[in-house]
Amino acid sequence: MKFINRLSTVLSIIMLCLIAGNILLLSDIKTAIQTGSAIQEWMSFTVAIFLIIIGLSHLFAILNSVKLFLHFRNDSLLRSATFVICFFSLFLLAVDVMMLSDIGHEYIAGYDTTDEWRIVFAGHAVHVVFALLLLFQCIAANRLISKNSELTTAVKDEALFLTVTQIGIVSAILGLICLFLLSGAGLPQKHLGGLYFLLCIVFILPYGLATGYWFFTKRKEYPADWYDEKQFADISLGAFVTLLSTIFIALVIYCLLTFRIIDINTSLWFPEYFMLSLLLFSGSTLYLSKRV
Amino acid sequence: MKLGNNIRKYRFEHGELTQQELANEVNVTRLTIHSIETGKFMPSTLLAIKLAMFFGKTVEEIFYIIKDED
């Protein structure tokens, strides 16, 4: 475990350096395109290599997060946030590749590539945030591993239950932020529906994987044994809070729309409702579980 | 009226059991034991009896009612 975590620490530092290098190279390429200068081949090749290594580091980070959870069997908001942002960063890595490919075609044809460059650099900002979170996670984990404290095995697991709620909260918050940023970005309406759906998939994926793993661990138990009595009580109250809150929020939005105070794209409704419900349910369940 | 308990006291008398170890014995999570000890959660009859049986005490020795004027 120590070795994997130290390797992850080194990879996160390397990732930060590669992202910084990529940003510098892409800035040079952008300047070359804008001034009409020739782009040196080694630049494109280096950017491609850097992106591949960054992508592989993301995959290793997912493995490291899972290993850390299985080792410590505790909930950690930092680990949950790193896990969710890793998937988002991986998605943006794929977006970077697409945008760079678009830029490659469009600048030759003489089109403006400003918006594509904005997306690429915004994506790299998210990669930096992820690399920093991963570094903090690895440093914190190294300290805990060094303490070498004895861990008592839990018969009734609470760590996975709490981790799933934390992942739900982070996924929902980031999902809502991205949905609303996308709504205000001024993109053509016909593309928005597909983009909302894609973003939902990206943010629900880590939550779905965590919940799927939780179901996998419970597969041999009767449903009555899936939770202990306090967890049942917390989930029930959390669901009730979610029901009341979503009705109230939907009513407020309905009134705002009816009196034309705001204007929301119809494709936004379900993704927004889904993320909001996930946030309210996960947030209230976590609060009730950890309330002292 | 609230429900008080002597779980923490009996835990220490029972070989300085940790909350996790006690939780394992009665098949609940550590957070549940912690919530019961701090009075934030009221256990079911079944769990109260399980705790009493584990400590070798009666339910009334583990749990008691705290009247509002106390």
Image (spheres, helix red, strand yellow):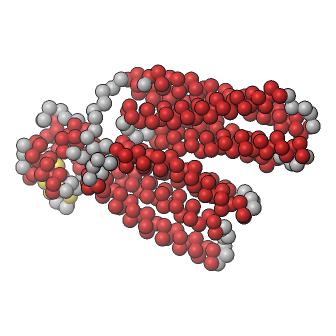
Q: Position of residue A196 (x, y in %)?
A: 63, 58
Single out the residue that lies furthest toward the bottom: A259
Side of A232 where B3 appears, left or right? left
Counting from the top left corner in percent of width and height, residue A221 is at: 27, 49
Up/down of B44 relative to A246, above or below: above
User: For this view, does A14 lie left or right of residue A250?
Assistant: right
Res. B18 visible in picture: yes
The residue at the point 47 percent across, 21 percent down is: A3
Q: Quadrant of residue A124?
A: top right
What residue occupies the far right of the structure in this picture?
A: A36
What residue do we see at 44% from left, 54% from top?
A283
Which residue occupies the foreground of this view, A200 or B7?
A200
**Residue A26 quadrant:** top right
State the count of labels: 0
Residue at image position (58%, 31%) is A57
- Up-down: is A268 above or below A215? below
Q: Nearer the viewer, residue A52 or B50?
A: A52
Q: Residue B24 versus residue B69: which sits nearer the camera?
A: B24
Q: Is residue A251 left or right of residue A150?
A: right
Q: Quadrant of the N terminus of chain A?
A: top left
Residue drawn 54% across and 31% down? A60
Q: Is residue A171 above or below residue A127?
A: below
Tell me which corner region of the image, top left, top right, bottom left or bottom right, holds residue A87: top right
Task: Where is residue A14? Give x, y as percent.
Answer: 62, 25
Q: Position of residue A215 (x, y in %)?
A: 37, 49
Examine the rendering and report whether any part of residue A177 can be seen.
no
